[in-house]
Image (tube, rainbow, N blue to C red):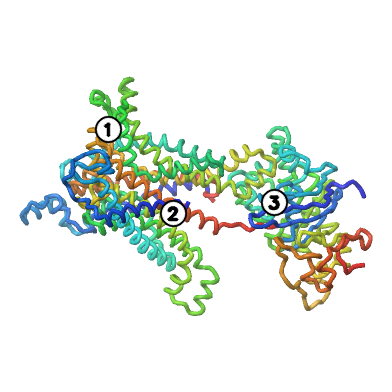
Amino acid sequence: MKLRTWILFRLLLTIPTILILVTVVFAIMRILPGDPVVAVLGSTGASVQQIEAVRHQLGLDKPLYLQYVDYVGGLFRGDFGYSMVRGDPVARELADHLPQTIELTFWSMLLAIPLGIYSGIFAAKKAGGKIDASIRIGALVRWCIPVFWFGLVLQILVVQLRLPFPIAGRASPRFVRVAQVTGLYVVDAILAGDARALVDAFAHLALPVVTLGTFMAASLTKIARANIVDVLGEEYIKVASLKGCSDERVFQKHALPNALIPILTYTGLQVAMLLQGAILTETVFSWSGLGALLIEAVSYRDFNLIQGCVVLFALFVCITNLIVDISYAVVDPRVRL
Amino acid sequence: MIIAGTIIIVIVLAFDVYAHIVGLDPLVTGYQTLSPPSIEHVMGTDQLGRDLFSRVSLGTTFSLLVAFISVIISVSVGSIIGALSGFFGGRIGQATSLLFDALYALPSLLIAILIATMIGPGVVNTGLAIGIGYMPQYFRIVRGIILSIKERPFIESARAIGAGHGTLIFHHMMPYAIPSIIAIMTLNMGSGIVEVSSLGFLGLGLPPPTPEWGTDLGRGRDLITAGAWWPSTFPGLAIVISVLGFTLIGEGLDEIFRATSTRKKETF
Amino acid sequence: MTDLVLDVKDLRSYYYLPSSTVKAIDGISFGISKAEALGIIGESGSGKSTIGWSVLRALPNPGKIVSGEIRLDGRNLLELDREEMRKLRWKEVAVVTQSAMSSFDPLMRIGDQISEAVSVHEDISQEDAIERAKEIFQEVRLELSRFRGYPHELSGGMRQRAMIAMALVCKPRLMIADEPTTALDVIVQAQILKLMDNLKSNLKSLSIMFISHDLSVVAGISDKILVVYGGKMMEHGATNEIITNPLHPYTIDLVNSFPNIEETKMSFESIPGNPPDMRAPPSGCVFHPRCKFAWAKCKDVVPSWREIEKNHFVACHRTK
């Protein structure tokens, strides 16, 4: 079928997918043991009436299916409910914290994708040799280092070695007011034409991005190398070589394009891992992004807020999968049939 | 690779066993608080005056235990449902597929955080929280394998002789899935350890004063600026080494299984 | 003898495995003339494919050409360095293999892959290369509408034709076909063989080395047949000769194991025993363990290669 039709189908498919994810989140929150009301009020011996009042206020006394309908309906309107602890709309909290996470993940990907994939390609080219082995071991070890510990170690190094890097936060206090337009410090600094703010933003991005980016790069390296080596063993590579193509040409024109497709898919799927890492990285470096918001909500048992964060994460993943699937169809003629 | 991994794990376990034998107590306070590594306290002491070496060594037990529980839970539930889903197919198959796909889309740590919040701390609880996030992996693999061999002649003939569903699934089909499952189980031991410590770092998971690597290094965070680097460093080192050990074993197994299943015939 | 396009003399290629050495071919000599098709027939493990890959100097890794001469139009291919061989390969000698599906890059259009073969060898423009590719495309009876298609869009037979087209686009002197029809069903197989036959007559200077285990297929297309077993030559002669008057016991068995559409033969004879273990081949005549006519001498002495009748060579003690 034509590419356009396929893309349309795929876009339509997103809706039920999101619906299912939202339902799963809803189910997890409602079905697991633990009473949200008690959690919110704490074990300070609230009276039965107080508990009932809060329960009614939160709509938790309605039958489950009504709660579900309310919830999904609300989502469509952009209404994520109200934070039980803070009282303001969850949607606003999400919007406030979103830019931080976006900035962190964006720059981390920007570092991770070229670093990871090029290392993988390089290792594959020199497969079997010492360089290949070192790259593979390096990636493997980095993969085994938990994101949060890596960040902590960087902080320790900065402190012990007295390096001039900021170890927490997004910007030095005097530059905070610069971020008014998008909430993305780098973009805002550029928009404001403030060079010092820009440098400051990058300085604050440095450690977190290295932490998260190298982690993602490690898994990309392994996948990239494995896929390229696999492809190099295929029959058509041998034929291309026999046909008279130089080794370089075989690699660039036949091996890489074929290997990049599964690599691409895998990269898309890694976004889930990236978000996971973001949660931890934000905590370590005290960035108040969605991840930190989630952790806070969790510690307060703020159900609506928790739910909102998770739904947003799920949406992220959905959208990324969509982008990956579409790119896949554009690049690989076999998919469209 | 496997050999290297196994050696590492053995070393890690040795620490743990040593600590148990010697009777180190991770809970004893009273040593000088926050003293850097020395001969007496090889890894230093934490802010409550506890010996870090004891805590890190005995923490091995907990991390490995929780990871193990999570793997057992995810393998058993994931594989069985996956097998049933692939075997019976139809609506059940599609429904379960959809469900697990949705679960697979969410980051496993996220799921673990949610569940851990709901059901509270504890070894088994944390194991469960982590395990649920990894179920989809096993579900997918087993379902995929079952689907691909379901129509093969040898299954048909087994059916013809009167083999029941149970026999077909467990005796005839599952063996094909075992190599992949084992490789992934090992790798997930590593991931499990990382997740336990992530949860610990975030304040979830095992209750204090249990010596857990992640929790300990999480509490060591605020001390970094004060110059106390060891409370956060050593537990982390322990995590890296043990995860490395399991990952090496898992990757080694994976390589072996990959090599034997895709061996092409050489024609002379 | 007229000028030979391919002249192979005493070729030996071994595979050096970690535990043992497999003498895949051990003393093979033959020649192919211009516009001639030689069929090389043998079982799996007989070394027939190794012959083809040795000529191409493209043996898979533990394999090495140990000794012998491979002369293509007089030039000894074994004296060329890697780069010279790369330039020569495909331009003078090309190969068509069994697996047409996996021989094409799934992401590139068929036509582009064929014209690629031209552009890496000749310094011509993109358009000209495409024109050449289109010409050969039609020569193999493929519709031009398929030219811009992808490999997965073609049927098995079409892909095989495309592979033949790709092999011939540089107008090589020799085309090596290694089990080209084995993966195809009988009807498509017949079409491909007919195509190859036509190409042989249309492209006047095309010689073919047709490698197969299927005698009926080989017999249809070849002018001469070479029978190999256990890495050694058993018999060589004109196709008609071999089929009607096989002299080597192995050849006799081969011919007998195929049904003849004209006769009413009811019983088939198969060849007893198993192919030899090439890590430790039998002593004396390689075929003796399975030979109905073997006598004591066959176990000890390697039979010599002799011309029994005109242009009909055999290596067997039994024939005098």
Numbered disc 1: secondary structure: loop
Q: Chain of mark 2?
A: B
Return the mark for residue A168: 1
In percent of width and height, residue B230 lies at 27, 39
Q: Chain of mark 1?
A: A
For the residues labelled 1 and 2, the Cα–Cα distance comes to 36 Å
Q: CA distance from mark 2 to mark 3?
A: 33 Å
| Separation (CA) of disc 1 from disc 3 | 60 Å
Seen as rendered, the residue at the extreme right is C310
Query: To which residue does mark 2 refer?
Result: B250
Give the percent coordinates (x, y) of residue B130.
31, 54
Find numbered disc 2 in the image and state the secondary structure of the residue it sits on.
helix
Percent position of residue A309, x then y: 27, 45
Mark 3 — residue?
C63
What amino acid is at disc 2?
A: Gly
Look at the picture and state if C176 lies above or below A194: below
The residue drawn where x is 48% and y is 43% is A136
For discs 1 and 2, the disc positioned in front in the rendered view: 2
In-image side of C192 versus C225 (left or right): left
Chain under numbered label 3: C
Q: Quadrant of residue A92?
A: top left
In this rendering, position of residue B159 left or right of residue C115:
left
On the same chain, marks 2 and 3? The answer is no
The residue type indicated by label 3 comes to Gly
Residue in view at x 66 percent, y 49 percent: C61
Q: Which mark is residue B87?
A: none
| Image-quadrant location for residue C81 | top right
In the image shown, does A298 or C167 lie closer to the viewer? A298
Across and down, in percent, residue B149 comes to: 51, 66
Helix, strand or loop at mark 3: strand
